Image: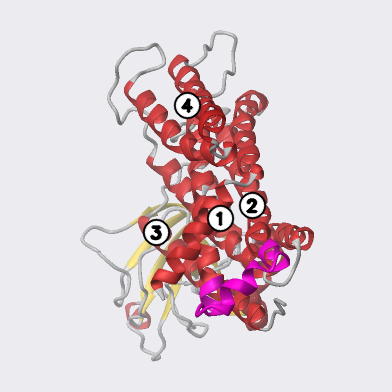
Amino acid sequence: MFGQILAIARNTFIESLRQPVMFVLVLAGGILQIFNTLLSAYSMGFTEETEVHGDDKMLLDMGLATVLVCSTLLAAFLATSVISREIENKTALTVVSKPVGRPLFVIGKYFGVGSAIMWATVTMLLFFLFAIRHEVMSTARDHLDGPVVLFSTLAVLGSIGIAIWGNYFYGWVFSSTAVGFMLPLTLLAYLATLFIGKEWVPQDFMTDIKPQIMIAASCVLMAMLVLTAVAVACSTRLGQVMTIVVCAGVFMLGLLSNHLIGRYAFDNRFISSIREVEIPREQPALNEVGQSVTIVLQSPPTVQVKIGDSLYYSADPNGIEQPVPLHPAWEGDPTLTKDIAGANGRRALVVQKFEPPARYTLVNVGGLDVKRLPRINDYLFIRPTKSNWPARAAWSVAPNLQFFWVSDAITQGNKIPGRYVGLVGGYTAVQVLGLLAIGVMLFQTRDLG
């Protein structure tokens, strides 16, 4: 079984590289990165530094968006080429008439076209990293990054030159040869620029390595695995034009999923966010009777909060996974020791003290099992979050590209935790498996005669 999948994937990978659209879109992705460095010079962006600063924050968004759009178009074109065309040419019938099951045919096609798209996407991401290293020339005193310009140009021209030479003397397919050589040559060129500074001065290898941007690029790669699965599933039943239309629709829905569906999945509105957190010494948690914490809000809450009111907080603006458990409204005096001890048998996290304009002290009454202390940038709520299960189910099933788009965190100076990358990887695996299952079901009853 694995040998059959590998054979189909290998042939599909080679066939995908031979498609002229592969070379055109990869080259277009590199050229567009040049325009990005020019167009983003007028963003008048933020000045605080993270891994990027000023106009380079706009360059980060435009560069990743360019890679995502070009790769999505590539997925739609290649998927239809490797499945729909084989159905039309009756080659699919020849394959499945052998001892090769239809599920293995679809899975092998996905791995083959997915590998080709990853090859092209990594190449485009290297062009994007060249642009990030070059940076935006915002003023007249800025100069071209010599190593970036020279090494990237040599990599592209070298791969095209090898393809022309191989096509003329050995009959190699131009597009597959050019794209095949472009990735290793571009990778070598990028590694070379890491050792040489803008002024042609040797530098430490890690100087221009940006880990957070690398994580953002890896998330774009995972997004392409999902979009490729969408394209393969559609191409088992639809032609090229309709597959492109569906992929475009899924792409737009994925970008707007949070707005169209996600905001209805959880019913809650935050009243403010936390700017500062003051924790008493030697207090590791907030889950025992009498433990307290002082928070300072970014702005006064949108509703009136009185002493004795219960409060909830969460890292998500929709109130997902609130560390404070659901508890009934509390009645008592939070300044009295007997009431804080839970004399009435109730447990809560309530406001014990308020100092204008937005400084609140919270106290644990009765030993409520609070999962963690509040953190800076947490969102504050006056009630627990309710789930709208129909909207939540639709939001969970539809591919959500916002999960893969993490450039906003970089531009705002927020570190992307490794746990999030792991969750995105799990989400990618579930989406791909589900979409391939749909593709297999659609292909099972497809007439190939």
Mark 4 vs 1, N-terminal side: 4
In the rendered image, which residue does mark 4 sit on?
155
Give the residue type that dot 3 points to.
Thr
Q: Residue 33 lies in what quarter of the image?
A: top right
Give the residue type that dot 2 points to.
Thr
Say whether residue 324 is left or right of residue 157: left
In the rendered image, which residue does mark 1 sit on?
224
3D distance between C-alphas at marks 2 and 4: 24 Å
Mark 1 vs 2, N-terminal side: 2
Q: Main secondary structure of the magenta part?
A: helix
3D distance between C-alphas at marks 1 and 2: 7 Å
Q: Secondary structure at mark 2?
A: helix
In the rendered image, which residue does mark 2 sit on?
72
Q: Are marks 1 and 2 in contact (CB under 8 Å)?
A: yes
Judging depth in this view, the residue of 93 and 66 nearest the camera is 93
Mark 2 vs 4, N-terminal side: 2
Picture coordinates of residue 108, whole percent (x, y): 50, 67
